[in-house]
Image (tube, helix red, strand yellow):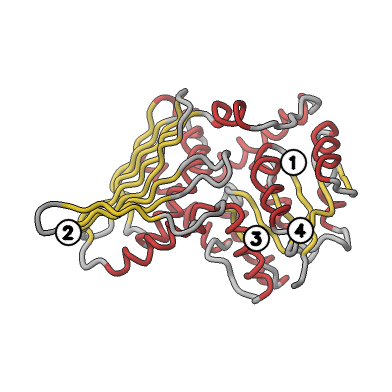
Amino acid sequence: MKQFRVGIVGCGEAAQILHLPSLYQLADQFAVTALCDVSPVVMGGVGDHWQVPKRFADYHELVQQDDVDVVLIANPNAYHADVTLAAVEAGKHVLVEKPMCITLREADAIIAARQKANVVVQVGYMRRYAPAFVRACELVRQMEKICLARVHDVIGHNALIIEPTSRVIRGTDIPKDVLAEASAIQNRLIVEAIGDAPAPIKSAYSLLLGLSSHDISAMRELLGMPNGVLYAAQRQGGLYLSAAFDYGSYVCQFETGVDDLPRFDASLEVYGSDQVLRVVYDTPYVRNLPIRLVVTRANEHGVTEQHEHPSWGDAFLIEWQAFYDNIVNHQDPKTSAEDFRQDLVLFQQMIERMR
């Protein structure tokens, strides 16, 4: 079995809690050989804990290393496109955390670069690799009729769950001007993507790029690309969003928000005339929590409810296994750069409705 050497750009909570444990579990397939972070405290602590020898402050150096085959991009969103392009142009395969990028221009540049370099670029939509979700997609394709669908994702701030359950090395040493630069780049890219807009609309777009990208992406795989956006609205400064997607013979309702309750309330539901399918997600920041499929059907006297938990294993682990297979077999991921571009198209349509 070929082992791929991984360089990680961005060693924050996602890398520490989710990716590094998954890569350690898949030690026959992956070995982490290099780290990059703007915080010496974070990079030193993570590097020492996971015994990673090479450490860089500049991602340009990491992607040029001969002992790096794969680059995980988990740094701030504003830099995802630049690091992805640098890695691809260096001939590295890339697993990039969502969002892959912020603008259609960046997406098109990544797609063109990937095609030229003939490498794998996979977007980190781990929810779509969960066996319960894959099973739901199979059952939806068998349904004679869909009457209604619903995408629901209302969660507490991640810190409410992370702080009691994990030890995270924080970058308290990052200079303020570095943080300000990242914020300015993010804002500039959002203006490029949607035009100048009031702060709540910009916040809504940021939420779509973040939390909601998981939901919209999964919706597309489960149901296909909608015909259009019937309506979309933001409230509470862009922290609560709702929308309706036109699927012709039915409508998919979408709702999301972030509050101060330490819980994770996320699901996808598909209503047929004689059955209801529901995929139930829990927080990814506690590893190996089951993602379940609940199927409700009519019986002779009432209804039966079947709970399916197809397998144990964390969705991030399964995502990395899929990435490995895509590299070895020279195949495009289902969560490809081209696939992510469709999300950006829908996000921009939603923003126009919100205006």
Question: Is 294 located above or below residue 339 in the figure?
Answer: above
Question: Disc 3 designates what residue?
Answer: 110
Question: Depth-wise, is mark 3 or mark 4 nearer the camera?
Answer: 4
- Residue 47 found in image quarter: top right
What element does badge 2 sit on?
loop
Rendered image quadrant of residue 236: top left
Residue 271: x and y in percent read 24, 54
Q: How far apart are marks 3 and 4 (CA)?
A: 10 Å
**Nearer to me, 136 or 60:** 136
Residue 299 x, y percent position in the rendering:
15, 58
* Residue 150 visible within the image: yes
Give the mark toward the camera: 2 or 3: 2
Q: Mark 2 points at which residue?
A: 274
Tell me which numbered mark, 3 or 1, is placed earlier along the sequence: 1
**Which residue is under mark 4?**
87
The crowd level at tag 2 (other Cα within 10 Å; few <14, some 14-19, many 20+) is some
Marks 3 and 1, Cα distance to the nearest angstrom? Answer: 23 Å
Q: 32 and 345: which one is in front?
A: 32
Among all residues in the image, which is located at the extreme bottom?
329
Of the numbered discs 2 and 4, the one sitting upstream in the chain is 4
Q: Which mark is nearer the camera, 2 or 1?
A: 2
Residue shown at 42%/54% (left/top)?
309
Please state which amino acid type lies under the numbered disc 4: Ala
Element at label 1: loop
Label 1, on which residue? Answer: 11
The three-letter code of the residue at mark 1 reads Cys
From the viewer's perspective, is 44 left or right of 172? right
Residue 208 higher or lower than 159, as above or below: below
Q: Earlier in the sequence, mark 2 or mark 1?
A: 1
